Image (cartoon, coloured by chain):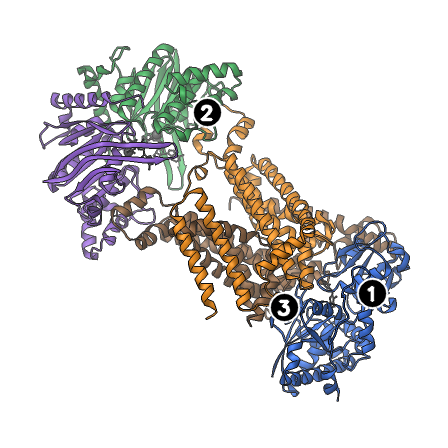
Chain colours: A brown, B orange, C purple, D green, E blue
Amino acid sequence: MRSALPILTVLLAIVAIWYLAAVWMNAPWVRDQAARADTVLTSGELIRQTLTLERPVLPAPHQVAAGLWEGVAGQKITSKRSLVWHGWVTLSATLAGFAIGTAAGIGLAVGIVHNRAMDQSVMPWAVASQTVPILAIAPMVIVVFASMGITGLLPKAIIAAWLSFFPVLVGMVKGLRTPDAMQLDLMHSWNASRARQFWNLRLPSSLPYLFASLKVAIAAALVGTIVGELPAGATAGLGARLLSGSYYGQTVQIWSALFAAAILAAALVMLIGAVERLTLRRMGMAR
Amino acid sequence: MSALPILAVWLGALGLNTWLSRFDTRATRLAVALIFGATILILWEMAVRIYAIPPVILPAPSQIGASFARNTAILWTDFVQTILKGALTGWLIGAAAAIATAIAIDRSPFLQRGLLPIGNFVAALPIVGIAPILVMWFGFDWQSKAAVVVVMVFFPILVNMVAGLAATEPMQRDLMATWAAPYGASLWKLRLPAAMPFLFNGLKITTTLALIGAIVAEFFGSPTRGMGFRISTAVGRLDLPLVWAEILVAAIAGSLFYGIVALAEKKVTFWHPSQRRQRG
Amino acid sequence: MTAIEARDVSLTFQTADGPVHALKDVSLTIDRGDFVSFIGPSGCGKTTFLRAIAALETPTAGTLAVAGMTPDQARRRRAYGYVFQAPGLYPWRTIAGNVSLPLEIMGFSRADRMQRIARVLDLVDLSSFGGKYPWQLSGGMQQRASIARALAFDADILLMDEPFGALDEIVRDRLNEALLDLWKKTGKTIGFVTHSIPEAVYLSTRIVVMSPRPGRITRVIDSPLPPERPLEIRDTPEFIALAQQVREGLREGHSYD
Amino acid sequence: MTAIEARDVSLTFQTADGPVHALKDVSLTIDRGDFVSFIGPSGCGKTTFLRAIAALETPTAGTLAVAGMTPDQARRRRAYGYVFQAPGLYPWRTIAGNVSLPLEIMGFSRADRMQRIARVLDLVDLSSFGGKYPWQLSGGMQQRASIARALAFDADILLMDEPFGALDEIVRDRLNEALLDLWKKTGKTIGFVTHSIPEAVYLSTRIVVMSPRPGRITRVIDSPLPPERPLEIRDTPEFIALAQQVREGLREGHSYD
Amino acid sequence: QELTLQLKWVTQAQFAGYYVAKDKGFYEEEGLDVTILPGGPDIAPTQVLAGGGADVIVEWMPAALAAREKGLPLVNIAQPFKASGMMLTCLKESGISDPKTDFKGKTLGVWFSGNEYPFLSWMSQLGLSTEGGPDGVTVLKQGFNVDPLLQKQAACISTMTYNEYGQVLDAGIAPEDLVTFKYEDQGVATLEDGLYVLESTLQDQAKVADLVKFVRASMKGWKYAEENPQEAAEIVLENDETGAQTLDHQVRMVKEIGKLTAGSNGTLDEADYQRTVDTLMAGGSDPVISKTPEGAFTHDVTRQAVN
Ligand SMILES: Nc1ncnc2c1ncn2[C@@H]1O[C@H](COP(=O)(O)OP(=O)(O)OP(=O)(O)O)[C@@H](O)[C@H]1O
Ligand SMILES: Nc1ncnc2c1ncn2[C@@H]1O[C@H](COP(=O)(O)OP(=O)(O)OP(=O)(O)O)[C@@H](O)[C@H]1O
Ligand SMILES: Cc1ncc(C[n+]2csc(CCO)c2C)c(N)n1
Ligand SMILES: [Mg+2]
Ligand SMILES: [Mg+2]
């Protein structure tokens, strides 16, 4: 709550700058149009027109808000024009990819911590995997899966998982290694098995790290899903919405889809934050 | 049946690596990583041959290598266009802007509390969405790619840098107070050095982001060169080995970029515990 | 009845800057029921020796026997409890949960666990704090909880590495009294590392003085003090003389650091 | 000639669980050249009082004067050096660099810095470690470096918060001797927090005993010991009597934890 | 019988015939269960076909022939589009009026991903380098929309008569302010939107029978769309899952598409084919295809379908 005022101030500043930018960036087109029609515009008329264009270079905030509202509340949520429906399509693939990515990340991290060969071989290649231009292979992934008869949610989820496993891997390796020598020695002095060590020491101490990386991972999964939806002939989802908006030059639609995606991302991150607080509180680790 | 040789190679490599990893010297560690990578390539090549996967779906590593050797001139042009001009310029501008902003708002808790949540929000934004907009604004050439990269890397670095500037221990700050150090001195001698590990964290994360951003942006319009351009045209021409050669370039460039930043981190933050320990 | 027997134990760490001789030809016999303190300047190998007894380090030369077994066999038989210098409690478990953990690992029944937890928490005066989390307790209370944890499974040998180092003098006095009490009641064998001369003198039946580079034993002093030791014993001439003896032993092998 | 003058100083922290009265009506006068030790159980406000003198905390009531100025003015004039309980060295600077840092901030010339660094490092026996990084030194060496840092710029007042808490007895003895020596040579005013009764008695001209909840001064004991104090003075009856007096003062205001 | 059709682009009236055939039950009447996969900017239908993700694809002939030369044996089984809808649309203010003289030094927007071949052929016939410089043209990889023209980032952009050209007009630029060059008029037209399968598919008589049914039903759909543009547009709209299309735009598109499909009953006109091949081979030093293709089309399917 303490930060409500600062956030509002910054938001207000952003909106103000945005309006100015909208006028400035849309003005050339409006002037051109006026010149083509041989009319002279007053500055008031010019500003009014820049803020109400149908295909603005930069839509004004209220246009985006209206587009968002129209997409969310102006349709039945099962309608193909509903952002809720497209959001849902994206969300389901995101969650599936997030689940796969998290499982893979944790699995690899457990392997790395317990197996020296894995420790030395996996990490550099995991880094390299993230430098592969995902957008470039996304269509190929989709095609390869399609050739195996798998279409729809899974290929997108795999792309999402590709991006989200990495933060989980890094965070978990760090987390599983946080127990200090003394805590490990204690376990050793009690002659605890490796499984015991894992469940009673490594796993609980890694949870704060896990949650921190899960927040990064879910945002990455969303990006991955949208990337998967973009080029690959996806027919629904926020990515497809972005693309078709771009295809028809409907900037308002692009921006609405973009904001819908950002809101979705923020909501997901907040959700994980809530789960984190709940878990840590139940474990007595929240102070 | 046909999976048997693949399985055999895999198990062999696994055994070799398990044995090698016991030595844990610099050389064996490198060898283990290389063997791991080589194994993947061999398995890939074997799979493509044994299952007769059509090259337009998945070319074999040998074909990719051949294409790489044949097209070095094209690959170099694309590398310069996308990585050097697009990604690197954008990354440098974005990082400089983020660091400057972090220092600028360092003295204003008000601005920090206002900007950081919004920064986190923007950082979670699927950047692919802004690419078409920025291409529309900044034109087709590398400038728009750099702009996308700037936007992508700005907030992660900003958030890390702000956290870093705040990451001094109370005792270290109190000491500065007991010496009545002016703002400039405590910024320069305490907060900036203390922020370095965080800053590098942000810089490392964003190396891969920068590559993704530059390539994605080419997808929305580009001159007739660049890695993203080449990949999409080559797919259209079913020249998959060239596509994978470009991907290879991207992966090498990305790993190198990451490696250089990690090396710089090691040099700059030599004093940080995470750099002093060998294994965590 | 020998509890711990070290013969010519040496332990060398291989480090990047060359080998570190943490222990060199250390021989020592500890009888069952002894309370032995180890004292010596920083880096003289006290912790290393205790860890070697606990099979947390392996000597590079010499032999070490614990209760007639190798240290590692003794560890597997859970022959000792170990208290580290810092409390090392698991923050996600309550105090009772922390004490319970080794018991769970060793497979004690639920009812047995409950009863043991109650007993040892009472022993260290923490009965009403079982449900609290470690960070809700002061440093001294945490250290007591970690001692309770080491006591809970009733090993014959108790190894303690500067358990009271972080506490203030008054609390330390109380815990010293309590520990002495416990030792008398249970007849455990205790190995105890400390930096404090009065503490070593007050608690021990034998005081082992060590010196560094390489770590070795310079004196073993048997205490003439009676088992019954009120706190005031520290102002008696015997006590002061013994303390003086230890201090001299320390000076001998002491370089500035 | 008063160096520090506290009149009815109170300091309350507002926390989530309600206010914590760290100091309550504390009045004390410290003359120039005094060596004053503060002793008391954990949480009694020793650190808080020292920090208030250093203008690192602001009293919520009462007045506090340092060298005739407000604490904050004194801080701006760089009237004191402060040694924290932990070394608090900057890990990215060498030991010499750490000692140099306050000098750089205060604008000493390069030559002057070099000379001062050499002098104080010699004083704490770290001459050959100037080029090492903090994490390459043992805890005791780090603590000595932090003392050197506080001495380097020669403030009239030296505030030390349990500077020797983490050191072993022998090293502590040496540093106690050295500190006493320095104090006699320079005539500085020293405020010194400790947990150790012998240390307080050995060093001080006055011993301030504090008790917690709320933090206040329960006794101020003037030392009858002469300024010339060999280490053996600790075995004299006067010393033991004084220690006993302090211990009683401590017991008075002490609850179990 | 199940059959999968991979489109070349997203769901829009360009593919009205197939959607109409599916919606109106024409496929069902033939006993076919057809799945229509929409395409996208980076979906190469040829690749999908090679990977086995589709049985039939809609593809432009230049891309199909290029793929054939790359070793992927594509065969044209039907050609619903008689004429090409491709053109270059320029702003009049850029001063371009004659392709032979005015393109030099200008920036032109071109689609890639297999759509660039007709353009490259045309430029090489004009003798213009596509590497930029004062004597050549600077080529932009055009994104998905007409912005480069509106933002004046390019002097000309590629447009289809039925789609992007309409968008330019919709954006508020009058036809008088534009200059257009249809590939048809420039004599470099190549065949668009044909139906292609792999050679191996044609070896299987049962599959060929299905293809016959498919082509017959599809052509019925095309003719229905030509006669009922309004209804066809509505059907397309219903099948568009992105919900981004507008009815007006799709109705106009159906009508414009109708002009391109009008002359075809599905049978490939060999003269058109020859002209396409000639255009592609005329590319001077860098022709799109270098050998005259053999067996790149078959009349078998259409012969049976039409009769
Ligand atoms: N794991 C290790 N690797 C390398 N050297 C080590 C290791 N553990 C201890 N040492 C070195 O061995 C010597 C003995 O260390 P040890 O911890 O036993 O000393 P100590 O007597 O317990 O000291 P302190 O009183 O400071 O705890 C020291 O020089 C130390 O630096
Ligand atoms: N910043 C703070 N916020 C809230 N409470 C504080 C703060 N600093 C100290 N306190 C409280 O004020 C009281 C006095 O603390 P102080 O650190 O001065 O004790 P101390 O005598 O130095 O104890 P110790 O010997 O453990 O160092 C304690 O109860 C402590 O919890
Ligand atoms: C990357 C890209 N490729 C093609 C088109 C244009 N386009 C849309 S439909 C169509 C006809 C295909 O049958 C064409 C050429 C584009 N806008 N962007
Ligand atoms: Mg030790
Ligand atoms: Mg304190």
Amino acid identity at mark 2:
Asn
Foreground disc of the pair 1, 2: 1
Left or right: A190 in relation to B80: left
CA–CA distance in space, label 2 to label 3:
63 Å
Foreground disc of the pair 3, 1: 1
Q: Is residue E170 visible?
A: no
Mark 3 Cα-neighbour bin, 10 Å: few <14, some 14–19, many ≥20: many
Circle 1 SS class: loop
Where residue A235 is drawn, which disc sits there? 3
On the image, the x and y values in percent for residue E69 come to: 71, 68
Q: Quadrant of ligand 2?
A: top left
Residue denoted by label 1: E282
Dot 3: chain letter = A
On the image, the x and y values in percent for residue E59 come to: 71, 71
Compared to residue C151, the image places residue B174 above or below, namely above
Compared to residue C30, the image places residue B212 above or below, namely below
Amino acid identity at mark 3:
Thr
Ligand 3 contact, mark 3 (Cβ < 8 Å): no
CA–CA distance in space, label 1 to label 2:
77 Å
Q: Residue at x 52, y 63 (%)?
A: B46
Residue denoted by label 2: D98
On the image, the x and y values in percent for residue D17 come to: 37, 42
Q: Is residue A34 visible?
A: yes
